[in-house]
Amino acid sequence: LVRFQPVGDAAVLAEFGTEIDRTLSRRVFQLHQHVVASRIPGVIASIPAFATLLVQFDPLRTAAGEIMRLLEASMETMAEAGCYQARRWRIPVCYSPALAPDLEEAARVGSLSISDFAALHASACYVVYMLGGFPGFPYLGDVPEPMRIPRRASPRLRVEPGAVALAGRLSAIYPMPTPGGWNLIGRTPIPIFNVAWEEPALLAPGDEVIFHPVSESDFENVAAAVAQGGVERDALMMPA
Amino acid sequence: MRECFIVRQPGLFTTVQDLGRHGFQHLGVPVSGALDTTSLRLANLLVSNREDTAGLEFCYAGPVLEVAGGPVRVALGGPVAARIEGREPRPLPPWRSTLLEAGDVLTIGPVIGAMCGYLAAEGGIDVPVVLGSRSTYTRAELGGFNGRALAAKDEVPLAPPQPRLRAETCLAAAPSAAGGPFRVVLGPDAHHFHEEAIATLQSSEYVVSREADRIGLRLEGPALRHSGPAEIPSQGTANGTIQVPRSGQPIILLADRQTTGGYIKIATVISCDLPRVGRLAPGARLTFEAFEHTAAIELARAEAAAFEAIIRTITTVSVNLADAAELLACNLVDGFVSALDEL
């Protein structure tokens, strides 16, 4: 059951639950896609998160009551329409201790060899639960059980863009240089955030991600191609 | 040389801000924008800009700016005054436009009794538009002047001046520093608190701590006790949301807040009171009053009407006789009279 609540006079929160859960998450994306597609007058933003959708609006143009009524109606239409359309990305990742400073330690904590650890991370299909915390920072889940290790005790002052990271049940890709406390277990040469793009983030909430292990030399080749502007988005997208 | 401000002293955390970067919160991009939107909007209107034009926001201590490349019309917004050094030294009060000549130096004084002040320049601060906005989000070096606060020797580009001569404008009366409780709507996590915490929020006085910046204001006062965990899976955040970490000391989220957060939220300040929140400085005392969201709509409309009323008080500055004589002398040279006809 979804619960609608006003957040001040300029937003409504649709709460599908209180857990991180893919079933709940799917319903969040469904409603998000519906809100975006409906172009409701006065709506300014629709922000999906793990189990909630926050819809912000201009209180001089519409009101919480009206938005809640429209969201409820959307829920009914959605139930008939079925699932939302997810895009699926295949992201090359190099799992090499030379590029991933926490890989050896993470594998040790998980009682796995480095190659088993990498293979396990690349075996899952992750959903982009949400982006947040930092521009373009994707929260991906769920990480296979033996790899669930806590954040580092002391965060790094600078994490390189493209760092593939782990914290608990979540994985992430750092979009730009930033301080960060997640465990760095791989690195992708693919840029995932660029303000020059019309849609500045490669990954959108609800997308699916599969990590594709590559060697260090392939990493360098793709990085070189990226630097020359030679990697098309479509080449990373998997057929539906 | 093109028109610019050369920064002689940067002031404290002086950044380029407009009314925010909208449309990318679902991708984790914060809104940013002016904390005290009312002051920026009014300062813009005084120099004939659109309300959402990019200006400079400074905290506590204003910058010292030298005008280069050409004349520029400016106005200050907020409780802050400046001195103009140059051919015609004079003080500049807030809420009044004036024309600065190339070579003039504008020394913007401390902001009195608020956190932020604003400088609007006719045509606006001409930094590149990033994702639809010129606002600065320093944590990700996004937008504004190279994504950061201004530093000495920076040359801040200005839009080319509109060469028309016109009379200066001012607000007939400075916007009143409205007091009274900050109006909130309880929730969305009010059920995660003890009932007494809800009562405490509405009956207690809180003080803005020294941990106050563009992300949020940490308050000090009676602790607000959770009835369960203090953290939940992250949710989208709204401007003015009051989140309460484990310490029980509330934090009001502002323009540079992250788009998502996992602290429990007890209430949210209604949108028309947000510019007032943006004016609060460390040490300021505040109280809260809860409203139903349905009643908050009326308050928002009343506030919008009050803003329109302020705009209607924008008038042409009357000149004293000595200045008038000087202006008349100018007329002979550069056709000031015909320019006046446009008003």
Image (cartoon, coloured by chain):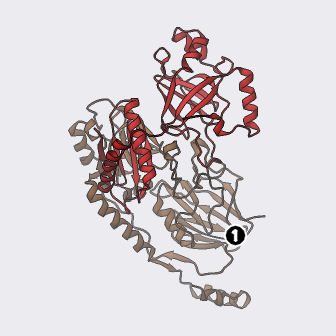
Chain colours: A red, B brown
Whole-percent x, y for residue A156 in the image: 58, 26
Residue B257 seen in this snapshot: yes
Regarding mark 1 in the picture, which secondary structure is present there?
loop
Whole-percent x, y for residue A119 in the image: 58, 16
Q: In which quarter of the image is the N terminus of chain A?
A: top left
Q: Eyeballing the image, is B63 above or below A213?
A: below
Tell me if B219 is positioned left or right of B21 in this view. left
Chain letter for the residue marked with disc 1 in the picture: B
Pick the front one: B309 or A196? A196
The quadrant in which residue B55 appears is: bottom right
Q: Eyeballing the image, is B285 above or below A132?
A: below
Tell me if A49 is positioned left or right of A125 in this view. left
Whole-percent x, y for residue A215 in the image: 70, 20
The quadrant in which residue B244 appears is: top left
Residue that carries the numbered disc 1 in the rendered image? B86
As drawn, the residue found furthest toward the right would be B1
Pick the front one: B284 or A188? A188
Q: How many marks?
A: 1
Please report the residue visible at 66 percent of the width from the left and 33 percent of the height from the top: A190
Q: Quadrant of the C terminus of chain A?
A: top right
Question: 10 Å neighbourhood of mark 1: few (<14), some, or many (≥20)?
Answer: some
Tell me if A178 is positioned left or right of A45 in this view. right
Amino acid type shown at disc 1: Gly
Please report the residue visible at 52 percent of the width from the left and 43 percent of the height from the top: B27
Q: Eyeballing the image, is B44 above or below A78?
A: below
Residue B287 seen in this snapshot: no
Whole-percent x, y for residue B286 in the image: 33, 51
